[in-house]
Image (cartoon, coloured by chain):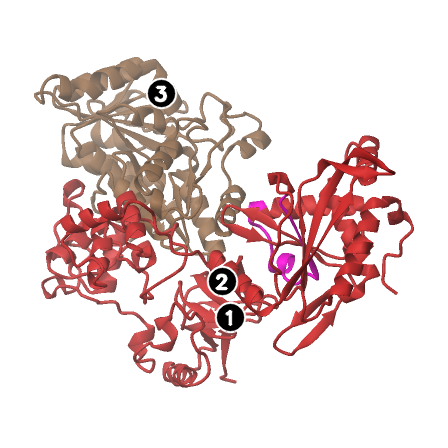
């Protein structure tokens, strides 16, 4: 298998789906250019390929009709994607930073998410909205949030939060082929992460958790960048005889309830790590699921690890404190083993 | 060196005779290092963790959670990797033929003593293909089935081909519940979920079953039928004991030969009371006090003491030192310690087995603390050497820890004298039963205003009745009476606390 970065895995998925299905189009700011790319179209000179270089090379391959650069206007990007999706295309729109969804959210949560339901199944909106989430880049309060919990409250939206290059490619291909609107959250701290990614096209189903570590004493449920911190803790504690199971749900909507509950049933101790919110977040929803469905399996209270209820700080020192870290996760596991 | 070592039920304190294995904290086959937590053992009063005495590898687990075993019984075998399984089997077999016997008279523990074929390696490594229907057996091709991780894991362990199981999840995904349903539908039985997978259940457990997951109806039915939930299967949702499980066990025992409907009728008839099996703690209290009442000839000495001065002293101290809240009980502990130092023949324990009297140099005074689950007697050590302030603080801390359930074995084992106070209930006077190996107990009634003759006048004075129970085998009437005299003097003349020696000569 080839080793690829998370960024390359996403590009792979886009390129392969565009080659496979002509209805797949990309819409967003600077998908072709970016960082000063300003050459005339005929010159076929590719610039940076998006603010993070994810779409680099796609314009030269598929041309301006399918890789559509837009002005800086989120409402137009998502509105265009939602409309195009109803007409039969499979647009993949890029919001750059997910934090910007507020500008364009009507088109997504009040239009695209409702089409299939309100038109009695006669319309569908197979679009994907890609964007970056996550803190750790000192990108400050307006560019560091992880609002997947907000998307997941809307019925009709599917929400994908991949943690590895392999999952990113398989889940994105699945998201593009899905007939419902999918919000695809890419963690900005993971773009350079490398992992084994098959060259051929493959899908990872939505709504199936992945156990990145198997264990018997404690279950850590984590998403995206937090999965790797949980893995780190699991590997460290294994040497001390504490066996940790790490459950990465991979998609928050649909949520793999069975995958979560079965792990909880087998360990009876739960830590949930969530970068989204200190209140009303993914962690709180999963904790409620466990408390209502698997209470009798619990040997100790559920531990939630979230950021504080503040905007993400700009100061690198404060931001480091804000993000749930390995030490907090490790302490939580140890606490559970003593409870 | 390929030696086999054993992990045994430790003796935590003088009175510990048996322990119940609550839970293994490490798995069979895993290595541990000195000081690491190995397992939890429940004694009559506390649950404690057994720490590894040395480094080793836990090769063979012999005791299962729920087994009650005598002190010294072997819990597990520890050996290097070089030691073969057959050597371990031979060693385990030699243990079985030899020493360790089951402790609990009431609850024989089959896991260790009657395990049928200790020499068969299969006995130790539960392949657990208990009853998988033949139609489901086979090997799962993980690339061809859609199943949860746990379902895949269990299928592998149980030798089941998941392609023969239909899934109820999203896109037909197979969950553990689907697997369980398929086994049951095929006429088999297997307890797949971890919490349910308790092996080698004792038949008639007497342990507290309040923590066993069960449906409310099952719990009520079990208590009405006198069935301990430990003994039931757990086939209900989320691995709980269901009503059907309780009825099945009742039928098995012949107590519930009626059909389910008639069981309900029987329940109706018996519903006048709830029958509750004794908890481990209640059993201990019952057997020890029964033994005391039977073996120790109790005699009692009663005297009434005047509290006017000691109460004045208490108020003075408390108003001068608001941080301290000295109670009458604190002062009584101090007074008893003084009296015990003056009459050292009272400061003793009696060891029935060796027929010896242990005479102590310090007054270790046990205080009876009643909790809903039973009676605790935490001990205030060396009360004779401590100031009233120290006694007050430590007593408060002991009572708090008792209520919080965080007492350690050393907190309640031993003691040379005991005080039981029912004054807060308005009891005027009562007789207490001695808590062996102690030889005396002081029963304290309520402090109250009583009419007494004082200097030729009938006046109201604050008085208290004390009743001392002594074990006549080791304490004679005169000794007890002398003690009461000293105690009375210490209470009525509290200033003596300032001058009295803290030790007996």
The picture places residue B416, in percent across and down from the top left corner, at 70, 62
Look at the numbered disc 3 and give the secondary structure of its residue: loop
Discs 1 and 2 lie in a common subunit: yes
Mark 3 Cα-neighbour bin, 10 Å: few <14, some 14–19, many ≥20: few
Residue in the foreground of this view, choosing between B328 and B394: B328
Q: Disc 3 and disc 1: Cα gap in Å? A: 79 Å
First to last magenta residue range: B403-422
The picture places residue B394, in percent across and down from the top left corner, at 71, 47
- Find residue B55 and report its image quarter: bottom right
According to the picture, the residue beneath numbered tag 3 turns out to be A38
Whether the magenta-drawn stretch holds residue B189 is answered as no
Residue in the foreground of this view, choosing between A154 and B325: B325
Q: The red chain is which one?
A: B
Specify the label residue B41 is tagged with. 2
Mark 2 Cα-neighbour bin, 10 Å: few <14, some 14–19, many ≥20: many
Which residue: 7% across, 21% down?
A: A122
């Amino acid at each position: 298998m080839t080793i690829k970065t998370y960024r390359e895995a996403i590009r792979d998925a886009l390129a392969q789906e565009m080659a496979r299905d002509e209805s797949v189009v990309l819409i967003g700011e600077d998908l072709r250019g970016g960082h000063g790319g300003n050459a005339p179209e005929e010159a076929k000179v590719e610039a940076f390929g998006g603010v993070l270089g994810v779409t680099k090379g796609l314009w030269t391959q598929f041309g301006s009709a399918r890789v559509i650069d837009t002005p800086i206007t989120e409402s137009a990007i998502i509105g265009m994607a939602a409309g195009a999706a109803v007409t039969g295309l499979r647009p993949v729109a890029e919001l750059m930073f997910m934090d910007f969804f507020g500008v364009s959210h009507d088109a997504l949560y009040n239009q695209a998410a409702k089409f299939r339901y309100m038109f009695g199944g006669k319309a569908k909106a197979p679009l994907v909205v890609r964007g970056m989430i996550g803190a750790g880049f000192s990108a400050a309060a307006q560019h560091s949030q992880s609002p997947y919990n907000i998307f997941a409250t809307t019925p009709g939206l599917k929400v994908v939060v991949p943690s590895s290059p392999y999952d990113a490619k398989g889940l994105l291909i699945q998201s593009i082929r899905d007939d419902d609107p999918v919000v695809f959250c890419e963690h900005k701290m993971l773009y350079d992460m490398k992992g084994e990614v098959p060259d051929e096209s493959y899908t990872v189903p939505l709504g199936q958790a992945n156990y990145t570590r198997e264990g018997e004493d404690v279950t850590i449920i984590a998403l995206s960048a937090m999965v790797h911190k949980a893995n780190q803790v699991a590997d460290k504690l294994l040497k001390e005889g504490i066996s940790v199971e790490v459950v990465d749900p991979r998609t928050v909507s649909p949520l793999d309830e069975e995958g979560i509950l079965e792990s909880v049933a087998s360990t009876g101790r739960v830590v949930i790590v969530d970068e989204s919110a200190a209140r009303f977040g993914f962690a709180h929803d999963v904790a409620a699921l466990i408390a209502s469905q698997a209470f009798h399996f619990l040997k100790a209270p559920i531990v939630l690890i979230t950021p504080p209820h503040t905007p993400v700080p700009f100061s690198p020192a404060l931001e480091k404190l804000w993000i749930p870290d390995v030490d907090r996760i490790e302490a939580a596991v140890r606490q559970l083993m003593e409870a | 060196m390929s030696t086999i070592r054993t992990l045994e039920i430790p003796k935590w304190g003088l009175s510990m005779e048996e322990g119940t294995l609550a839970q293994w904290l490490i798995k069979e086959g895993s290595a541990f290092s000195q000081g690491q937590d190995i397992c939890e053992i429940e004694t009559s009063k506390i649950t404690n963790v057994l720490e590894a005495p040395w480094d080793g590898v836990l090769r063979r687990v012999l005791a299962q959670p729920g087994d009650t075993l005598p002190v010294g019984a072997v819990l597990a075998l520890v050996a290097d990797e070089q030691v073969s399984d057959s050597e371990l089997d031979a060693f385990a077999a030699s243990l079985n033929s030899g020493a360790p016997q089951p402790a609990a008279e009431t609850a024989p523990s089959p896991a260790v003593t009657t395990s049928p074929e200790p020499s068969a390696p299969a006995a130790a490594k539960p392949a657990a293909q208990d009853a998988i229907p033949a139609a489901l057996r086979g090997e799962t091709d993980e690339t061809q089935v859609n199943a949860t991780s746990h379902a895949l894991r269990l299928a592998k362990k149980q030798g089941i081909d998941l392609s023969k199981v239909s899934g109820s999840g999203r896109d037909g995904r197979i969950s553990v519940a689907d697997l369980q349903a398929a086994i049951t539908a095929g006429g088999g039985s297997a307890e797949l979920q971890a919490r349910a997978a308790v092996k080698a259940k004792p038949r008639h457990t007497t342990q507290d079953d309040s923590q066993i997951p069960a449906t409310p109806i099952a719990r009520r039915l079990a208590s009405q039928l006198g069935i301990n939930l430990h003994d039931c299967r757990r086939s209900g949702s989320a691995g709980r004991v269901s009503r059907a499980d309780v009825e099945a066990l009742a039928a098995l025992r012949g107590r519930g030969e009626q059909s389910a409907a008639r069981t309900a009728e029987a329940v109706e008839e018996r519903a006048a009371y709830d029958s509750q099996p004794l908890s481990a703690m209640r059993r201990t209290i019952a057997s020890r006090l029964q033994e005391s009442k039977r073996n120790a000839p109790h005699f009692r000495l009663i005297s009434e003491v005047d509290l006017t001065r000691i109460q004045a002293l208490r108020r003075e101290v408390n108003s001068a030192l608001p941080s301290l809240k000295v109670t009458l009980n604190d002062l009584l502990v101090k007074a008893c310690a003084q009296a015990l130092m003056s009459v050292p023949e009272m400061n003793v324990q009696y060891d029935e087995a060796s027929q010896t009297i242990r005479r102590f140099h310090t007054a270790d005074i046990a205080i009876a603390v009643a909790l809903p689950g039973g009676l605790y007697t935490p001990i205030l050590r060396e009360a004779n050497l401590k100031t009233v302030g120290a006694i007050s603080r430590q007593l408060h801390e002991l009572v708090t820890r008792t209520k919080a359930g965080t007492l350690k074995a050393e907190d309640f084992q031993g003691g040379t004298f005991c005080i039981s106070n029912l004054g807060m209930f308005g009891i005027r006077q009562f007789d207490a039963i001695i808590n062996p190996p102690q030889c005396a107990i002081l029963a304290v009634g309520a402090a109250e205003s009583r009419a007494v003759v004082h200097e030729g006048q009938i006046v109201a004075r604050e008085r208290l009745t004390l009743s001392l129970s002594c074990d006549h085998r080791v304490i004679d009437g005169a000794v007890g009476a002398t003690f009461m005299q000293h105690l009375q003097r210490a209470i009525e003349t509290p200033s003596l606390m300032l001058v009295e020696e803290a030790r007996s000569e």
